[in-house]
Image: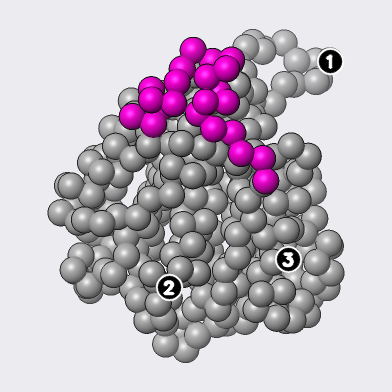
Amino acid sequence: MGATIKGMANYIPKKVVTNNDLSKYLQTSDEWISSRTVIKRRHVVTHESTADLAYLAAKRLMFKYEIDKNKIDLIIVATMTPDFLAPSIASIIQGRLDCKNAGAFDLNSACSGFVYALSSAYSYLDSGQVKNVLLVCAESMSQVIDWRDRSTAVLFGDGASAIYLEKSESVPMHFRLKSDGSQCFSLTAGKQKPNSVFWQADDSGTQFLNMQGRDIFNFVSNTVPQEVTRVCTDAGISLQDIDHFLFHQANSRLIEKVSKKLGIRAVPLNIQEYGNTSSASIPLLLCELIDSQKIKRGDTILACGFGAGLAMGTIIFEY
């Protein structure tokens, strides 16, 4: 048993913020940002919600591949920037798409969200409980960024990607999920302010994204090579059998270091155009590579996400 990706589509907000735009109100420059991150621009919402991004990506997907809304059994949305604590974004777009037969839930594993959501979708399909899954990764990172903080404001962007998966009799997926909760506060965002009249504890903290970059860099650079090697061993294949390595688009230097440790080359990047879009970063890249025919049917792909949690996930699948 297994699952196969039948189609993908992206939706990117129209508003583009360049490094030069940021330099007008931050003590930074295009040279400073691009030389350290390779990021040149990012797309940000001006009126869309995260649910809007998810819906528009899903709508494009369904139109592009003529997907019957009534055949969708389950909708999974990966996001760390939901519009509400309840309802879920998955429920919102289930209603807007009129997918009457679909269950729906959100999943928050931040920058590892795509791998966690894809492994969840695969498990549902592999179990035989569902036949078709709509998976959407959507983020409005611009809503949780302190735009006065140079250390984070230059890094993130918004976007969404939708994936349609069908049950397959012969295409397995292999995945490993890992977390180190002892470092969970190395990246925080969206702290909830208590409203109870009985609340007496310390109310310090910020709703804005706060990141200890060095902690995450060390975690990823040490853990990713180990996990990539282990998932290949579990799948009974070697690194040489992988056609495409897709890493979360967080930091070009980090991806370069991980690639060097693994001895792999030509790892694709699109962080220069979108910045870090958290759960959406890997599927945005995957969809672009499919649309440009750089990834073809039958290719073997290894995707690895990592970030807040500190969580990471690695998955091997055939397109």
Q: Is residue 264 visible?
A: yes
In the rendering, at what x and y percent does residue 237 appear?
22, 72
**Kind of residue at disc 1:** Val
Q: Is residue 81 visible?
A: no
**Residue range of the region highlighted in magenta in the rendering:** 14-35
Going 29% across and 37% down the picture, which residue do you hit?
A: 253
Q: Residues within 10 Å of mark 2 (few under 14, many from 20)?
A: few
Q: Which of the 4 image quarters holds residue 201?
A: top right
Q: Residues within 10 Å of mark 3 (few under 14, many from 20)?
A: some
- Circle 2: element type: loop
Going 52% across and 75% down the picture, which residue do you hit?
A: 5
- The answer for how far apart the CA atoms under marks 3 and 1 are is 43 Å
Q: Residues within 10 Å of mark 1 (few under 14, many from 20)?
A: few
The residue under label 2 is: 293
The residue under label 1 is: 197
Going 67% across and 46% down the picture, which residue do you hit?
A: 14
